[in-house]
Image (cartoon, rainbow, N blue to C red):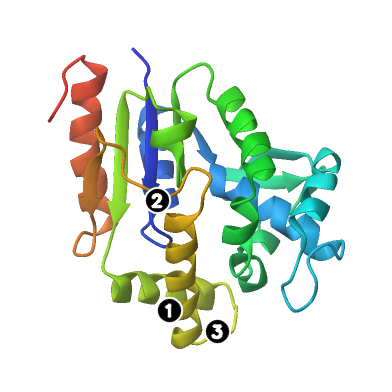
């Protein structure tokens, strides 16, 4: 039996890392919902809809949504899917700080969320999927057989994100990363449209003191229970 696995949580908790690992273990499809919102943000930045100082009109973004196509294609070299914006690989561009600083307010726009959620549901229609984001278990797949809500200490998350950006050659300070995460946490948790919140039936996973293998082992034990029809409370 194949199931749907929803992984939600705060920025830089390792949602994507864990979701990818689960998908690889099970042979499931992995979908990075956050990449979709990042792609929309990138399009609006590159086309002047979002101004250089970060200001934008929600109506202007809504007006160009039909011009935006987001898709995924497996990258054999990375052993993961790359994000494509209108047919162009933008996997590296969407991870830049200029996108990170604006993706939360852009994703809070109701029409943007409606379009991306429709695509997410279409991609996950056939089960056997692991999807991570902010509202997967509460909105996109409220009937998912397994929901995980991830969190971690803010300082731990800051260091993880800083190290990730540094490894990619992106110059940024710890203070900038800390401020960005705090801002995104606030915006994600307080937005009107499907805010970041733990689903009542989600399993809380604080990985502040867990390494990647430890958290994967823990989750895979739960996955095996769900696949077999059992359910941990």
Which residue is painted at 57% across and 59% down in the image? 104
Q: Which quadrant holds residue 4?
A: top left
**Distance of label 1 from label 2 (alpha carbons):** 18 Å
Would you say the residues marked 2 and 3 are in contact, meaning their CB atoms lie under 8 Å apart? no
Residue 15 numbered mark, or none: 2
Residue 172 numbered mark, or none: 3
**What residue did someone put label 1 on?**
178
SS for tag 1?
helix
Q: Position of residue 112 (x, y in %)?
A: 67, 44
Which residue is painted at 79% across and 76% down in the image? 52
Q: Position of residue 221 (x, y in %)?
A: 18, 33
Q: Nearer the viewer, mark 3 or mark 1?
A: 1
Quadrant where the N terminus is found in the figure? top left
Q: Is residue 158 left or right of residue 82?
A: left
Q: Position of residue 47 (x, y in %)?
A: 87, 61
- Confirm whether residue 145 shows in the render: yes
Q: Earlier in the sequence, mark 1 or mark 2?
A: 2
**Distance of label 3 from label 1 (alpha carbons):** 11 Å
Q: Earlier in the sequence, mark 3 or mark 1?
A: 3
Local packing at callout 1 (Cα closer than 10 Å; few below 14, some 14-19, many 20+) is: some
Q: Earlier in the sequence, mark 2 or mark 3?
A: 2
Name the outermost residue toward the left: 233
Which residue is painted at 49% across and 65% down in the image? 184
Local packing at callout 2 (Cα closer than 10 Å; few below 14, some 14-19, many 20+) is: many
């Amino acid at each position: 039996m194949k199931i749907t696995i929803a992984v939600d949580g705060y920025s830089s908790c390792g949602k994507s890392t864990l979701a990818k690992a689960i998908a690889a273990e099970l042979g499931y499809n992995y979908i990075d919902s956050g990449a979709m919102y990042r792609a929309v943000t990138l399009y609006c930045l590159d086309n002047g809809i979002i101004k250089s100082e970060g200001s934008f009109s929600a109506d202007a973004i809504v007006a160009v949504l039909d011009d935006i196509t987001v898709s995924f294609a497996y990258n054999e070299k990375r052993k993961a899917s790359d994000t494509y914006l209108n047919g162009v690989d933008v996997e590296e561009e969407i991870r830049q700080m200029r996108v990170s600083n604006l993706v939360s307010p852009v994703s809070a726009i109701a029409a943007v969320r409606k379009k991306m959620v429709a695509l997410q549901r279409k991609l996950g229609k056939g089960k056997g999927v692991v999807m991570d984001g902010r509202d997967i278990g509460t909105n996109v797949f409220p009937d998912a057989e397994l929901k995980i809500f991830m969190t971690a200490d803010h300082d731990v998350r800051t260091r993880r994100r800083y190290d990730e950006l540094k490894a990619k050659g992106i110059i940024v300070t710890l203070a900038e990363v800390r401020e960005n995460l705090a801002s995104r946490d606030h915006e994600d948790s307080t937005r009107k449209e499907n805010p970041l919140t733990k689903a009542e039936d989600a399993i809380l996973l604080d990985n502040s003191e867990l390494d990647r293998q430890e958290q994967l082992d823990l989750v895979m034990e739960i996955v095996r229970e769900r696949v077999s029809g059992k359910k941990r409370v």
